[in-house]
Amino acid sequence: MVDSFAILSATRKFEEDPQRSDSESVFCSILAQMKGGYYSILRGRALSLTLAAIVFTTLLLWAWEKSPFANTLFLTQERFSISSSDYHVETSNKSSNAMRTNGNIEEKESRLVITEEINNVVENSGPVPIISTPAFLPEMQNSGGNVTSSSKTKVCNYAKGRWVADSRRPLYSGSECKMWLSQMWACRLTQRTDFSYEGYRWQPENCKMPEFEKSSFLRRMKDKTIAFVGDSLGRQQFQSLMCMATGGKDSPEVQNVGWQYGLVKARGAIRPDGWAYRFPKTNTTILYYWSASLSDLVPYDSSNKTSNVAMHLDRPPAFLRRYLHWFDVLVLNTGHHWNRGKLVANRWVMHIDGKPNKDEKRAEIGNAKNFTVHSIVRWVDSQLRSHPHLKAFFRTISPRHFFNGDWNTGGTCDNTTPLSGGSEVVQDGSRDPVIEAALRGTKVKILDITALSELRDEGHISRYSFRGTPGVNDCLHWCLPGIPDAWNEILIAQI
């Protein structure tokens, strides 16, 4: 039997609690009535047990309502009952396919046997990435369903995009830029009659590229020196930039300062090792130095024109070592001279550590090229710390478009229809894996022009070479104005 005294005592304490709720007060009133009018009934066992159960349940509910654990549990349930419509993540299911190519760019560099001089004339030159923030950064995109913070930015991939028609092109006249443009590359001065290739510009996919304007460019390059070091495709890019910076007009005020860099024509030479010009109003210098292999070339006997030349694969050209501290922008390139015919014709003998190379595996053309590219990239990267003003770029290889043969076996590039093979590059990686791999982990930046140039086979000089040989097509070099202008626009955007 339940102790009646204990029940009455608990009831009294419950009545005296000043913090009880209205429902609790009502219950107290009932208890009071029971205490006064029906006290005798409590003697019955059944009713006593019933009353005890009621009191115990009421006390338990009252204690639960006062408990902080109950409040916590309720809030937790409320927090996770948000409607799914209040939280939505957009997903993207975009797919990208690699750009189709005509197969002229060799995937394995050891198979790359490419000749640069179409008339097989050996060039005789004598001995010879701070991560830059681009002018415009793309907005971050959602990728693969992952939410990307809008406060984060990434460097624009200027190599991914499309060619678009632009009635404001070309940027200069090919028939008027005679002071800077070689006749053999000025297709307006040849018998070619179709110039539709001039009317396009390159548009990157997810970033804006500033419109080129010569005065603005020269102001940005005030007191700066831009140096191109590489083969004849580098020379084309140099001439393109000179035409762009002058509007293709004769500019007598521009000074020839090649002598300051030792770029003077040697006695008996076909041409100097390079050129350098300065715009006096802004003190902007643009120069080019011929170094087709980017290795240090030292004749065995400088007094003998037929002497072999030591080709130091692990050493940058002496010109770079001597003048690098004068440069603010450096653009390197190499590729098309790395074939056995060129090495033999130029009498280049591979050297490593100052001695003739004895490693047969390294002597293979592809391996030798890769070794040299990695060597010069490491050297330039090591110099950037002591030259904080310098921005260094390595341009990827310019593609050839010989169809149905090579330059000396009847190969042609007769197409005159722009973008007949497509207008868009959708891949993320470079089409020049050698350069891409060499730059990885360094502060030397990539100037990636291979894939976008592969789409423009109609822009080559073709059979209209100024000094061309009948039956021989130049499907390596480009008409100017033309594709190299886009290379420079991308370069300027990345500076």
Image: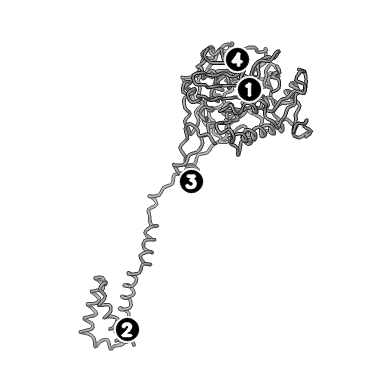
Badge 3 amino acid: Asn
- Which residue is disc 2 drawn over? 49
**Marks 4 and 2 close (CB-CB < 8 Å):** no
- Which residue is disc 3 drawn over? 146
Badge 1 amino acid: Tyr
- Which residue is disc 1 drawn over? 289
Q: Residues under labels 1 and 4: Cα distance?
A: 16 Å
Badge 4 amino acid: Ser
Quadrant where the N terminus sits is bottom left
Instruction: Identify the mark nearer the N-term, 1 or 4.
Output: 4
Count of numbered circles in the view? 4
Q: Judge depth for marks 3 and 4 and give the one in front.
A: 4
- Which residue is disc 4 drawn over? 182
**Marks 1 and 2 close (CB-CB < 8 Å):** no
- Check the image and report above or below for 80 versus 418: below
Apparent side of residue 168 relative to residue 124 in the rendered image (left or right): left
Q: Judge depth for marks 2 and 3 and give the one in front.
A: 3
Label 2 element class:
helix
Q: Residues under labels 1 and 2: Cα distance?
A: 108 Å
Label 2 environment density (alpha carbons within 10 Å; few <14, some 14–19, many ≥20): some
Q: Judge depth for marks 1 and 2 and give the one in front.
A: 1
- Check the image and report above or below for 252 versus 334: above
Q: Judge depth for marks 1 and 3 and give the one in front.
A: 1
Label 1 element class:
strand
**What residue lies at 58% left-to-right and 13% top-to-bottom?**
192
